[in-house]
Image (tube, helix red, strand yellow):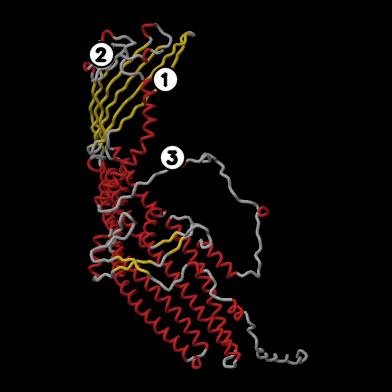
Amino acid sequence: MPPWVHFPPIATDGSSLVPHDTRTKTDLSPPSPYRLLVLGTLALMQGCSQGLQNVDERVDRLLAERSLAMHAIDPPRREHRPAEELESPDQYDTEPTTANPTPDELEFTPADPNRDSSARLRAFAREEAGVDKDAEPLVLALNDAFQIAQTSGREYLTAEEDYILAAVRLLIEQHRWGPRLFNDTSLTFSGSGDDGDIRSALRVVNDLRVSQRLPYGGTVEARWVYTATEQLRATASGRYAQSSQIILSGNAPLLQGGGRTARESLIQTQRDLIYQARSFERFRRQFLVDIARDYFSLLASKAEIANQKETIRILSAQLARDIAWKDAGKIALFDVNNTRNDLLAAISALDDLVDRYATQLDRFKIRLGLDVDAPIRITNTAIDLTEPEITLDEAARRGFEFRLDLQNTRDRVIDSGRQVAIARNTILPEFNLIGSVTVPTDPDVREGGLVFDPDDLSFSAGVTFGLPLDREIERLQLRRAIIGAERARRDLDRTEDDVYVAVRAAVRAIERARSDLLLAEQRVRITMRRLEQQRIQPDRVTTQERLDTAQALLRARNARDRAETRVRTSILDYLLVTGQMRVGRDGLLEPLPGLDIKPIKIFTNTPDLDDWFVSPVDEQTRLRIKADLFAEEPPAEEPPPPDPPDDGGS
């Protein structure tokens, strides 16, 4: 067993309790590098199991501090997958498999050309919406969509991770500016021959050091270097030797790289975390508006389906009446065919609306982070928001003051100015102070242990000076920084102009949506009266007039439903672009003083989902549509004119 595996007692101050002149090679202090390696390995294993938990706690604490400082919501704690689960057995495979079969290996089944495509479309839509599935559908109101989106939405999770990564980057940079502990151990076996006599030696060097960056540039470092050597083939008196030394060193730049510019990496990462906190809060508000817009779009699609089915019902009844009037000789066949044509177009439009709704529903599931195959049902609920009373100039003032993204743009202009100062610093000459102090153990003692001898202290101090003979690259970088700062100021001007225009447009959009809604409601009432008058006096109305009325009613109803949706979304957009929207920790819109938020039912005439995919055309109407379009003989075509006589080619 090597002699350094036995240890003498050590005092609390690190000195050996064995007298210096009585120690032998078996009274070695401090612990051997072998034991240090074992202890370090055990500590590393323990640190790996506890390290990530400690990191998560520090990140959560940092995010909570930054979010609280700006009166925002910090991301909730989320459980991350263990690192082992993110690794794959194929991650080192240099030839990943590609699925690309040959044409002979593929299959293609032709469809029946006589199939009922309209019925298949409705079946596909039922399948996409999960109507026929055994699982109970998830009923989603608007507030439910808000909460799910800010819990499992992929876009939300990505924005949340960007915020977390900014905190991780700051923790990394803060750690670099704190005291950092390192330990390097080297084990070297060497040998040499002398007339066939091989002498070998085993040398162990352990370098334990701690370094610290200085606030205005430079570093200081303290090192403890421990060396142990054993001659494996030598006289007994010279087999083993051990010594150690403490080294204190440092350097400090006075010109280039010195001053506040030395802390640029720490300053920028601290500011970046603030920017990311603002961006995350801005995203939460924008995401709520996007979810509301998608939800209202689904409701509008449901209303369009209901309106289209009502139009088909009107046209079906009109077709039956027109056929009866044609049989009575009151109208011609082409009037009946006009009604048939409009009815066929309405059925085709309904199939398109149902298919579009199914696609919208699938995209909405994806945005919420739900399973695409999961059946969900969108309820006809919305929120009733108080419309603001505000001038254009006051709205613009609030946008300039409260917009978080605009605040980021302003602060980045300040960052660009700091980059100019840093670029100017690189042109300065290099002028650094350097120094070191070394305190070894007694060099006359073969086993020095921890008994350091101040009488053998050595030190050095000096300066280094570098003339700026070649600073062409640095001057070019300074010019680039100046251009970047000027560009940042122009970007700020452009952003402020965009905010000014967007805020004023948002205020006008509310009034325009309210006006459109009032006009659309009047159009619906007028068209309904027109339809009722045509029913009362059928003999005084032509077929084309009835068809025009049905289409006008459909357009008026759809315009009314779209305007009703725009009123709500325009208020949300106004709150967003002025920076006044607040989203709570539960993902719901928070009320403001004077702003009432109430859930209401809209589009109450919209049928249940299960009824949407049922064809509105009964069998009797189908027979009317498929009736012979030429029950009466079509007019005979005039014979073509005779060919001119042949004059013999003269």
The amino acid type, in three-letter code, at marker 2 is Leu
Report if residue 483 is visible in the image.
no
Is 77 on the left or on the right of 428, as rendered? right
The reply to whether discs 1 and 3 touch (Cβ–Cβ < 8 Å) is no
Report if residue 226 is visible in the image.
yes
Q: Give the quadrant of residue 293.
A: bottom left
Locate residue 405, reporting x and y percent: 30, 57
**Which residue is at a point 31% across and 60% down the rendered structure image?**
589
**Does label 2 or label 3 sit earlier along the sequence?**
2
- The Cα atoms of the two marked residues, 1 and 2, are separated by 30 Å
Label ID, residue 83: 3
Label ID, residue 587: none
Closer to viewer: mark 1 or mark 2:
2
The amino acid type, in three-letter code, at marker 3 is Ala
Instruction: Sort mark 1 into few (<14), some (14-19) or many (20+) by Cα contacts within 10 Å.
Output: few
- The Cα atoms of the two marked residues, 1 and 3, are separated by 35 Å
Closer to viewer: mark 1 or mark 3:
3
**Which residue is at a point 52% across and 62% down the rendered structure image?**
128
**Does label 1 or label 2 sit earlier along the sequence?**
2
The amino acid type, in three-letter code, at marker 1 is Thr
- Compare residues 469 and 391 and report the one nearer the observer: 391
To which residue does mark 1 refer?
188
**Does label 1 or label 3 sit earlier along the sequence?**
3
